[in-house]
Amino acid sequence: MRFLRVVVIIGVVLGALFVGADRWAVGYAENRLADRIQARQGLAGSAEVDIHGFPFLTQALSHDLERVDVRLKGVEAVADGRKTRLSQLDASFHSVKLNGDYSGGTARRAEGTALVTYQDLTEASQTGVTVTYGGAPGKVKVTASLEVLGRTLTRSVVSTVTLVDAKGGGKTVRVRADEVPGEGIPGIENAVRKKTDFDRRLDGGLPAGLQLAALTSDEGGVHLTLSGTDVVLAGS
């Protein structure tokens, strides 16, 4: 009995040591991976990584991770020379095959969400307009000032924000006014739409392979749904 008790105690101690080592290793890997992602994406904000599955060490030795969750803040998407900021991007990467040097990996599939705040959209418009919630899903309110016959007029329009196919592949976020005050008056509609209507591509700021799939809007901003296959998690 005494021998069995000793064996059990030794087993418990070794098990505790293994669990402790495994948790230390996964914490170290999460921090290193977060640094890699932040450097690769050129984030203005931060990156947080959560590696799922136990034990981690056996996953690492096989170069296969079950699931990795990533939260990015301050993502700057640059496309066509224009910058659009994503306040937050949350993504889950499944079946991640690690690189030989553990500097990153590629996920068999990934899905997630991203938030573009109204301040982000206002800055992205680059036309001096103000963008706020439009009162219904998929709607935004765009307020612009324009010169008409020597007078400065301020007008607001309710616009629909949608995803449309972009030239060369991918998706573009499009903001278009549903109706324009003064429609039918020569020059007025074009003048307003030059201010209020705009397109923005976000491909340049997303992990390679992650695509825009859908969007909607609410009081907090425009919410994007993302998905993809063979998505790059990070790299050397």
Image: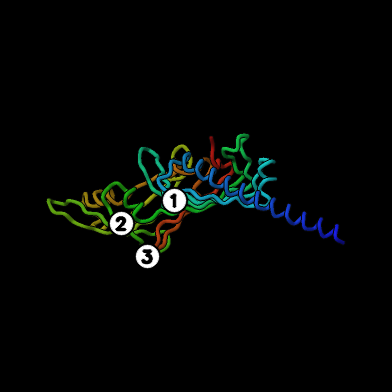
Q: Residue at x 27, y 53 (%)?
A: 129
> In this view, which residue lies farthest toward the bottom?
135
Residues at marks 3 and 2, CA–CA distance in whole angstroms: 12 Å
Residue labelled with disc 1: 73
Nearest the eye: 44 or 227:
44
User: Where residue 6 appears, x then y in whole percent?
Assistant: 81, 57
Return the mark for residue 142: 2
Asked if the residue under mark 3 is in contact with the one under mark 1, i.e. CB atoms within 8 Å, the reply is no
- Indicate which disc, 3 or 2, sits on the residue closer to the N terminus: 3
Please state, as top left, top right, bottom left or bottom right, where the N terminus lies in the image: bottom right
Residues at marks 1 and 2, CA–CA distance in whole angstroms: 25 Å
Return the mark for residue 135: 3
Nearest the eye: 31 or 142:
31
User: Where residue 141 appears, x then y in whole percent?
Assistant: 32, 59
Mark 3 surroundings within 10 Å by alpha-carbon count, few (fewer than 14), some (14 through 19), many (20 or more): few
- Indicate which disc, 1 or 3, sits on the residue closer to the N terminus: 1
195 with respect to 172 (left or right) = left
User: Where residue 194 appears, x then y in whole percent?
Assistant: 27, 47
Q: Residue at x 56, y 42 (%)?
A: 231
Mark 2 surroundings within 10 Å by alpha-carbon count, few (fewer than 14), some (14 through 19), many (20 or more): many
Residues at marks 1 and 3, CA–CA distance in whole angstroms: 26 Å
Asked if the residue under mark 2 is in contact with the one under mark 3, i.e. CB atoms within 8 Å, the reply is no
Q: Is residue 225 visible?
A: no
User: Where residue 145 appears, x then y in whole percent?
Assistant: 22, 54
Return the mark for residue 231: none
